[in-house]
Every structure is written in structure tokens, then in C-alpha cells.
Amino acid sequence: ASDPPVSELVQIDLEGRPVLGLADAPVTIVEYTDYGCPWCAKYAEETYPRLLAEHGGKIRYSVRNFPVGQLHPQAPKAAEAAECAADQERFWEYHDVLFENRTTLDVPSLKEYAAQLGLDRPRFEACLDSGEKADLVQADFQEGIANGVRGTPTFFVNGRSLVGAQPLEVFERIINRESQ
């Protein structure tokens, strides 16, 4: 019997996007997320911090926007807000605050979170109010569809798809295999 075909590896360009970790890390994880998604929040609270704390030296980590507006009407604007925070080099802190406040993602709250994090508020609000990040969020979403993303969270670990809020152990097995 022949081996099953290996699914084609997905190449995702990280240029100009928020990335944690070393450029030459053996494992690259790209997460497609929706800030209104309960499974994404579960992952963000339980697995993501441990993944970074315990394996940070071995991974590069990036996030793409995949807001499912039909399910979470406030998620697209929350994704725009995270990208506005990225303009001020505060993407990761803002990303964490969004998940901590997943059920309160209205525009006044998004602006308040920025203020709490000490962002340049007029600059942040101008970015958010103008909708200047909407095209970027939509481009991420379309890229996700093209890469086979059907729901959130979906991860690509060194180009291979991993779907759902997986426990830390699943990531650890892959990281250990990929960083041999």
C-alpha cells in the first residue's frame, strides 16, 4: 500500500505583520482567529500563554484575522482595532485584551481598551473610525478561505493545517517533531 498523499504545505507571508519569536525559529505557527469566537478565547486563555512560555524559543507566532461576522457581528471591527494597535507596536497586548473582553467588542469599548493600554488615543481612534484596516482584515479572511480555513481557530504549523482549539500537548508533539 502506498502512503497517503501529503497535503500541500501552505505558505503564509509574514512580512509587515505582527510576529512573536525569532526569525530562524524551527517552528512557525500562524493562527487564524476571530475575537468573538469562544473557542478562540478558550485557546487564548488556556493554551497560547503556556505555548509561548514553555516553547517560545522554538516558535515564531503570527495571527491572521478571520472574523465570522455572521456569528460574531462585532468581530470584524475588533480585528480592525487590533491592526490599529499594531500600528503603535501594541498588537499583542491588544489581542490579549480583546480575548479577555470577548463579549464586549463594541466600538466605544474598543477605544477604551486602547486607552487602558496607553495607546495614542487620537491616532488609534482615527484609524478605527476611518475603517482603514477593513481591507487588510478582509484580505486576511480571503487568504484564509484560499488556504482552506473554514472556522476558527485554525492554525498552520510549518504550513500544515491544525483545526480547532487544540490542547498544548498537540502543539508540543508537532514542535518536538519539527525542531529535531
Image (tube, rainbow, N blue to C red):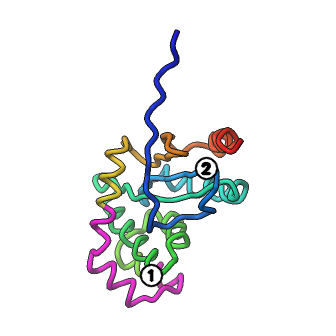
Q: Is residue 156 left or right of residue 80?
A: right
Mark 1 packing: few (<14 Cα in 10 Å), some, or many (20+)?
some
Q: Relative to residue 121, is residue 165 depicted above or below?
A: above
Residue 179 lies, with reference to residue 90, above or below; the image says above
Residue at the (38%, 87%) spot, across then down: 123
Q: Is residue 111 above or below residue 8?
A: below
Q: For this rendering, which residue is in front, 130 or 139?
A: 139
In this view of the protein, which residue sits in the foreground, 94 or 133? 133
Q: Secondary structure at mark 1?
A: helix
Q: Is residue 132 magenta?
A: yes
Residue ID at (39%, 73%): 81
Comparing marks 2 and 1, which lies closer to the viewer? 2
The magenta region covers: 112-137
Q: Earlier in the sequence, mark 2 or mark 1?
A: 2
Three-letter residue code for mark 2: Val
In the shown orientation, is residue 67 left or right of residue 153? left
Looking at the image, which residue is at 36% across and 71% down? 106
| Front one among 51 and 47 | 51
